[in-house]
Structures are given as structure tokens and as C-alpha cells.
Amino acid sequence: MTTPTPTVGRVSPQGVTRQDAATEPAADVGLRCANPTYGAGWPVVAVEDVCSLIVDCVNKTAPVVAEATPYRMIRTTNVRNGRIDLSECRYVAKDTYEKWSRRAQLQTGDVVLTREAPIGEVGLVTEAEGVFLGQRLMQYRANPALLDARFLLYSFLSPALQHQFGSHEGSGSVVSHIRVLECHPI
């Protein structure tokens, strides 16, 4: 009797599901912590092994403008419960947007993690045009050959990873935070 090869988890409106190994090539990747009761036996992997991009924000506050522009900054207050609320973003000039997004531009499907104030909030980018990371945020882009972006989001929202993020409470002298280097091997 052979052991079935684990496949990449996909997310449907009903939740995390496995793909049929006969219809999609298998990949030895899974994040059991996304749903501990489903997919037992899947390996737990470091996020850096299933992401094609992990980027830290520019670690200072971008200068804002009073008038609305096509360029919006996501702040930690915009990221809550798996969503990014763009209705309360601050606006910046084009040159500021270009400077603050020089490391990487957001793409639809990227996952954003707050490193501080509060720790461990995550959201899925659903609108990326002219949007960039403000201070204290990390950007994760799932490698589509290995992982669905929504599966990565739900993994970050799982009790196991929320516990891991919460373990950093009390880590700062005034405000708790996750250090950038600790965001890569989650």
C-alpha cells in the first residue's frame, strides 16, 4: 500500500480543501495549522519556503498630502480580521508612492501582516493599484505553484500562527512588535 502524496491545499467558499492528486501535480507542501482537523500528515513548512516574495515596509512614516490622490498608504489600522479596509487610507504624492514601493509593489492576492500595533493582524490585498505598505507591515506573496494566497491568509489567521505571533507580546520596551528577521521563518 502506498501513501498518497500530499497536495497543495486550496480554499473554496466552504473552507480549506485538498486537490485531487489525479487532477493536479502534487507538491510536498501544506500548512496543517490552517485547519488542524483537516489534512493531518501534511508537513508544516516555513513561510519563506512557500512564498516567492517577502518584503518589509520602509520603516518610517511616509509624508502624506491633504488631498485625495491615486496613491494610498495601508497602515496597521487598515488591516483587521483577514481584510484590508482602504476606505480610511492616507494619501501621498506620486514620488512618495514610488519611493515607498521601490522594494516591491503590492499585487492582488498578497497577504499583509502587521508587525506592531497590534501584532499579527493579517489581510488579503484585493485592490493593489496605487496602494503601498505603511510602517510596521510585511508583504507576503504566495508562490502560486505551491500555495493559494487565500490558504496562506487562513494559515496566518489560524490559532497556531496567531499564538506564534502573540508570543511576541511584551517584546518591545513600549509597544510589542515582531522583528523583521522573525517574519521570514514563520
Image (tube, grey):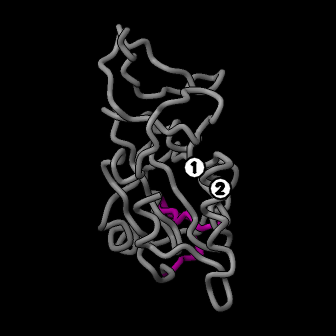
For residue 156, which numbered disc appears in the image?
Answer: 1
Which amino acid lies under the numbered mark 1 shown in the image of this protein?
A: Phe
Q: Nearer the viewer, residue 103 or 162?
A: 162
Determine which residue is flagged by label 2: 162
Which amino acid lies under the numbered mark 2 shown in the image of this protein?
A: Gln
Q: Are marks 2 and 1 in contact (CB under 8 Å)?
A: yes
Q: Residue at x 65, y 60 (%)?
A: 78
Task: Give how far apart the Cα atoms at labels 2 and 1 are.
Answer: 7 Å
**Which quadrant does the N terminus fall into?**
top left
Q: Nearer the viewer, residue 12 or 106?
A: 12
Stretch of the chain drawn in magenta: 63-76
Please tell me how crowded label 1 is: few (under 14), some (14-19), or many (20+) other residues with Cα within 10 Å: many
Q: Secondary structure at mark 2?
A: helix
Residue 186 lies left or right of residue 34; in this view the side is: left
Where 149 falls versus 20 (above or below)?
below
Q: Residue at x 65, y 30 (%)?
A: 37
Q: Secondary structure at mark 1?
A: helix
Q: Position of residue 127 (x, y in %)?
A: 50, 45
